[in-house]
Image (cartoon, rainbow, N blue to C red):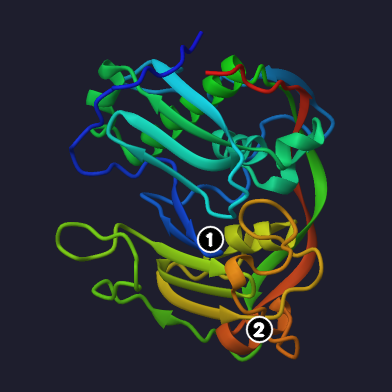
Amino acid sequence: MIPNLEDGCSSAKRRMRLAAINVAAVTGLMVFAFFGSTRAVAQSPQTAEGQSPVTAGAPSAPMSTLPTSASFEVASIKPNHSGEMRFFVGWQPGRFNATGMTVKFLITLAYDVKDFQVSGGPSWVNSERYDIDAKEPDSIAQEMDKLPREQRQQLARSMLQSLLADRFQLKLTRGTKELPAYALVVAKNGPKLQEAKPVDTPPDAPSGPNGHPRGPMMRIGRGELNAQGVGLGFLASVLSQQLGRQVLDQTGLKGNYDLTLKWTPEQGEGMMMGGPGGPPPDGAPPPDASGPSIFTALQEQLGLRLEATKAPAEALTIDHVERPSEN
């Protein structure tokens, strides 16, 4: 069992370690700092018909220097009733912090999937928000920075899976389905992409001691995306969340780019966290109603286009979940 986090636990003072994902949201815009972008869709080794029950705790890849599974030592989970659209999730040395997180979004982080890949469960898993402060065991916190990126990501997900199983009593069924998808390809007249400039730092972006950004950065609001130093696989991952459908990077372009994309969202196009976007939060102006669709914007502004296709995708079904006990 993961106990509640006691008041007075000292926070680590070393530099922030960006683990699976570090997200901050301010007035509807999101700033992303990845130490490595996650896969757009987690592939399952099972066939499209195969399904297997799974509790939220089993990792999907072995570790070489640390246990294959891990749990937080202590964790505080409290309902967030602020009504604000702001949210944050990040890893510091020895700690995991989240503000305004839905259970469904935590599942997508823990299992490296998108919102549309998770189904079932009560409606509150996608509406009620929670604040989480969790402490890693000292033995893991001391060694985690020494691991390769993929192992850090997987161990972080393992701890989130354990937290969901222990505190939310989460149980899932995992399988694969053939789902409608899009292929991201180069448009007829070629790409219109700007090679990344490492010395550029977006306004208000988290930066390291040398003033440079902490890895790839992205800011996204309703109908606007600005990114620095990202690969097109990363862009495909963001597009899949916006469109509620798997997007496969089939451009063949391997570079990192600085991207700006503006479009008029259609009804039902989602934000990165929380499904279909409503009115802009905090009084932000709405997108230009006469602007292009995201499909047109990709072609006109980036020289890319989306082609309809089908592809297998991992599918998670929530079999059981409970609200966490009071701290």
| Mark 1 Cα shell of 10 Å, populated few (<14), some (14-19), many (≥20) | many
**Position above or below: 260 against 182:** below
**Position above or below: 103 against 40:** above
298 vs 103, nearest the viewer = 103
Seen as rendered, the residue at the extreme left is 210
* Type of the residue with mark 2: Ala
Q: Position of residue 325 (x, y in %)?
A: 61, 16
- In terms of secondary structure, where does tag 1 sit? helix
- In terms of secondary structure, where does tag 2 sit? helix
Q: Position of residue 57 (x, y in %)?
A: 57, 19
Q: Which residue is mark 1?
A: 233
Residue at (66% x, 57% y) in the render? 241
* Type of the residue with mark 1: Gly
Q: Quadrant of residue 237?
A: bottom right
Residue 231 in view (yes/no):
no
Q: Quadrant of residue 203?
A: bottom left
Sequence-earlier tag: 1 or 2:
1
Seen as rendered, the residue at the extreme top is 1
Q: Report whether 201 appears left or right of 48.
A: left
250 vs 79, nearest the viewer = 79
Give the Cα separation between the discs numbered 1 and 2: 18 Å
Residue at (37% x, 34% y) in the render? 152
Q: Which residue is mark 2?
A: 297
Q: Position of residue 190 (x, y in %)?
A: 57, 87
**Position above or below: 194 against 213:** below
Residue 273 in view (yes/no):
yes
Residue at (35% x, 40% y) in the render? 149
| Mark 2 Cα shell of 10 Å, populated few (<14), some (14-19), many (≥20) | some
Total numbered badges shown on the rendered structure: 2
Q: Quadrant of residue 230?
A: bottom left
